Image (tube, rainbow, N blue to C red):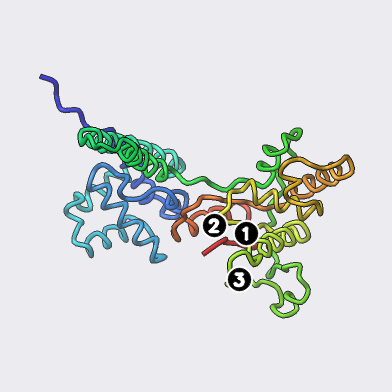
């Protein structure tokens, strides 16, 4: 008689994730944007990761002592195997450098388990044998869509990657170097606004409000362009509504002063084509990073922004829209 088949999981990868966090708590910013506690298969590993996330959300240090205290506060320390299990996690994980690899393994296997569950739900829909086949297919498609929608979020892409893909241009130009010391403010490029605000200060939160189709996104893109192209400021652009391709098309249209519909479909003459290529060259050198993941949580925005700041040094973050 065959033994019962267990769902896909990897206890070693789960332990490696938590062990990495206990060794270097700051490494959580690399994975907090996509790895959740529900992705863990073993309960005690899930509880430990939940404790790490709780400390992270409260801006507290993550290490063996603080995690043990957090678990004890939640009355879950013994359920996790006590302090001895935390020591075991550290002992079996010599470095935190590969935490993203471990986290991807945990996430991928959770997706496989979710796929198994989705298959079971679709089988149930089939067994119900409803007379409306279209309704049954819609339910099945919705089940798979929900699963696919939960896949790992897309990360930042440099604006050059979108331009190269869209226009199939020649070899990409080298990455621009990040500024070692960002200026204390970033100008919007709109003189009256900059005079009124004194530029965007590092701690400023600016909300652009208005009715639909009043130009809020256009204003945000113009500010991003002015900051990056004219000042070399590193801009992180989160687009929750529009994909990166149409966003870049609008930027290209503004930069070349050619109607966006003509840019989108390639309806331009030889002179305009030259302006397009000049605009591509200029925008390709701009340190603009776009993330068009449609449904980002606050913790994901924070994690991604922190990671880009560590790698490039962000001067301006634009979120379109709330």
Q: Residue at position x 38%, y 37% from top?
A: 108
Q: Residues within 10 Å of mark 3 (few under 14, many from 20)?
A: few
User: Where's residue 216, x and y in %?
Assistant: 63, 65
133 relative to 276 in the view: left or right: left
> Which badge, 1 or 3, comes first in the chain's sequence?
3
**What residue would you read off at disc 3?**
208
Q: CA distance from mark 2 to mark 3?
A: 20 Å
Judge whether 97 appears above or below 192 on screen. Answer: above
Asked which quadrant contains residue 10, the reply is top left
Q: Residue at position x 19%, y 49% from top?
A: 81
Q: CA distance from mark 1 to mark 3?
A: 20 Å
184 relative to 104 in the view: left or right: right
- Residue 93 in view: no
Q: Secondary structure at mark 3?
A: loop
Residues at circles 1 and 3 in contact by the CB criterion of under 8 Å: no
Q: Residue at position x 75%, y 48% from top?
A: 285
Q: Secondary structure at mark 1?
A: loop
Q: Residues within 10 Å of mark 1 (few under 14, many from 20)?
A: many
**What residue would you read off at disc 1?**
314
- Residue 99 in view: yes
User: Where's residue 212, x and y in %?
Assistant: 58, 66
User: Where's residue 82, x and y in %?
Assistant: 20, 52
**What residue would you read off at disc 2?**
305
Judge whether 106 appears above or below 244 on screen. Answer: above
Marks 1, 3: nearer the viewer = 3
Residues at circles 2 and 1 in contact by the CB criterion of under 8 Å: yes
70 relative to 262 in the view: left or right: left
């Amino acid at each position: 008689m065959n033994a019962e088949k267990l769902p896909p999981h990897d206890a070693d990868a789960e332990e490696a994730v938590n062990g990495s966090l206990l060794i270097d708590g700051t490494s959580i910013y690399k994975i907090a944007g996509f790895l959740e506690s529900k992705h863990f298969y073993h309960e005690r590993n899930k509880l430990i990761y939940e404790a790490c996330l709780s400390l992270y959300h409260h801006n507290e240090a993550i290490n063996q002592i603080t995690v043990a205290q957090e678990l004890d506060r939640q009355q879950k320390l013994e359920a996790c195997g006590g302090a001895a299990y935390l020591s075991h996690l550290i002992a079996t994980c010599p470095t935190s450098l590969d935490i993203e690899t471990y986290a991807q393994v945990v996430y991928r296997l959770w997706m496989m388990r979710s796929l198994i569950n989705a298959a079971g739900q679709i089988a149930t829909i089939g067994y119900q044998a409803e007379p409306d086949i279209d309704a049954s297919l819609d339910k099945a498609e919705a089940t798979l869509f929900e699963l696919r929608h939960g896949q790992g979020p897309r990360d930042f892409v440099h604006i050059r990657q979108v331009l190269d893909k869209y226009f199939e241009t020649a070899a990409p130009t080298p990455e621009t170097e990040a500024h070692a010391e960002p200026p204390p403010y970033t100008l919007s490029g709109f003189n009256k606004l900059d005079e009124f605000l004194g530029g965007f200060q590092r701690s400023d939160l600016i909300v652009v409000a208005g009715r639909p189709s009043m130009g809020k996104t256009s204003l945000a893109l113009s500010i991003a362009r002015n900051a990056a192209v004219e000042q070399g400021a590193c801009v992180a652009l989160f687009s929750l509504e529009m994909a990166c391709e149409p966003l870049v098309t609008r930027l290209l249209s503004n930069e070349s002063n050619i109607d966006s519909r003509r840019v989108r479909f390639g309806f331009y003459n030889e002179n305009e084509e030259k302006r397009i290529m000049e605009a591509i060259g200029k925008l390709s050198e701009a340190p603009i990073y776009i993330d068009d993941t449609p449904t980002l949580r606050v913790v994901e925005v924070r994690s991604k922004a922190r990671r880009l700041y560590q790698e490039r040094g962000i001067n301006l973050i634009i979120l379109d829209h709330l």
